[in-house]
Each structure stands twice: as C-alpha cells, then as structure tokens.
Amino acid sequence: MSGSGIRSAAYGLVPADTTEDVRTRGTDVSTQVAVLPVGSFEQHGAYLPLATDTLVACAVAREIAAAYPVHLLPPVTISCSHEHAAWPGTVSISSVTLHAVVRDIAASLRRSGVDTLVVVNGHGGNYVLGNVVQESSARGERMALFPAAEDWEAARERAGVATSLLTDMHAGEIETSILLHTHPECVRPGYETSDFVADDRRHLLTLGMSGYTDSGVIGRPSLGSAEKGKALLASLAESFGTYFSMLTGSGPTE
C-alpha cells in the first residue's frame, strides 16, 4: 500500500474531538452514550488489509455517530484472532485481556459522567464481548453489543447481499463491499477471483481457519460492491435506533 493509501485508511479511525467539544455537548442523558469500535489485526486473504475488521467497526461507528448524539471513541485494534494464527501478520491478545480492556474503558467513562457504553464489534471471534456485556448488565451497568446477527441479516437483505451470513464468514461479500465503499484504496486486485465456500465449520475452534481454507477466505468476495457497502452501513445505522432508544429513551438526531 502506498503512503497516501495508508494515510487514507487511517483517516477517520481516531476522532478529532477536543475536550472542549465533549464539554460543549453537555450533560443531557442522550449524549451520555459512548461508542467503542472493536476490530482486529488478522489475515483477510490477499486483497483485504489486516486491519479490515477495525475499518469495518469504525465505519459502522461513524455512521452511528453521524445519526445519534454519542461520544465516538477510538478503536481497539487488536483482539482475539487466534483462529487466524496460521497466517503471517495476525496478532492476538487473550480473551481475558480484551475483557479487562473493555471493562476498564467502561469504568473510566463512568467516572467522567458517561454511563453507557455500546461496543461495536467488527470481528466474529471476539466471543468474550458478549460475556462483558452480560456481566456488566447484571451489575446494573448500561452496556450493549452491536450489531447483533439480526441487524446484520436485516442489512444483508436491505443491501441485496446474495451470500448468506453462514457462507459469508471471512473476507467475503459483506466485508469487501464495506471496504469498497469506505476505503477502496485498501482493496487490492484479486477479490474478483477468490470465492471459496466452506459452510460446515463445526470444528473451527479446534482446527482454526487453516482447517477449512488455504487462502484465508470463506465467502464470495467477487459479489462485493461499493453500492452494497453503502446500503449495509445505512441499514445498520437505522437498526441502531432501537438500541439508542432502549438505552436513553431518545431517538436519532434530525
């Protein structure tokens, strides 16, 4: 990737707010929601960057921040990618560490007066995030995990994504579409000819991704398009309205 491509990919990942921007938003309950993108740093075939999940999580979080009065946080860029360990470039942290990082962020936010955290997860292997949210909710803390599978399914149907969520497991139609829309300079040639399907993955936790694919791809990236990526993000932003209303009793901004 060229230097300009790297700069373009990085743009928008880190919010540009100053402390005065945050102060100006005030203390209304509807502004006391923070959105934390959680991505990963793992292989996505030969045509998508290692940071794909982070780029996707940040794209979803930016759509949310454009429609709702939330505090947009910088992303967690390395997470639980152990199933991709067979490929060069993949970096992981333990589930215990990720659990602690998210809990610590939520605690810090509460000390500053932001009592609600929404975790926007861009990597399916971050199973522990569900535990973090469940445990926090049981303690009476306000936290949510987004998007749910139902939100992705609604977005898939709205965008005309042909591949099912089962088949579109990794570096497929959805991820390729979102990056073609948000960061086309990061998508290298080759996605057009990299389709690979492996729907029966019952031993994934034992074998890892390398037990099912040589390329690192499971899905149909050839069907991806920028138009689908735009529609996917728009649908997810709309779906977030239910979460926002549940957490604050408010709706989207006009």
Image (spheres, rainbow, N blue to C red):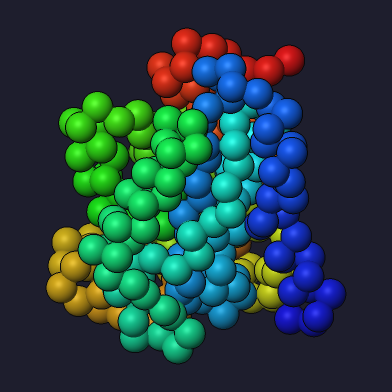
Residue 35 in view here: yes
Task: Residue 30: give x, y in percent of width and height.
Answer: 55, 19
Left or right of residue 81, residue 206 in this image:
left
Q: Nearer the viewer, residue 236 or 18?
A: 18
Left or right of residue 161, residue 15 in this image:
right
Name the image quarter holding residue 151. top left
Q: Nearer the viewer, residue 236 or 98?
A: 98
Residue farthest toward the right in the current orientation of the protein? 4
Task: Residue 203: give x, y in percent of width and height.
Answer: 16, 67
Seen at 42% across and 30% down, the residue is 115
Task: Residue 135: give x, y in percent of width and height.
Answer: 20, 39
Left or right of residue 241, residue 216 in this image:
left
Residue 125 in view here: no
Seen at 45% across and 68% down, the residue is 78
Left or right of residue 191, residue 149 in this image:
left
Q: Is residue 190 above or below residue 89?
A: above
Q: Nearer the viewer, residue 187 or 193?
A: 187
Quarter of the figure with the C terminus: top right
Q: Is residue 200 above or below residue 158?
A: below
Seen at 19% across and 68% down, the residue is 205
Task: Residue 131: give x, y in percent of width and height.
Answer: 22, 46
Q: Nearer the viewer, residue 165 or 97?
A: 97
Seen at 26% across and 63% down, the residue is 95
Quarter of the figure with the N terminus: bottom right
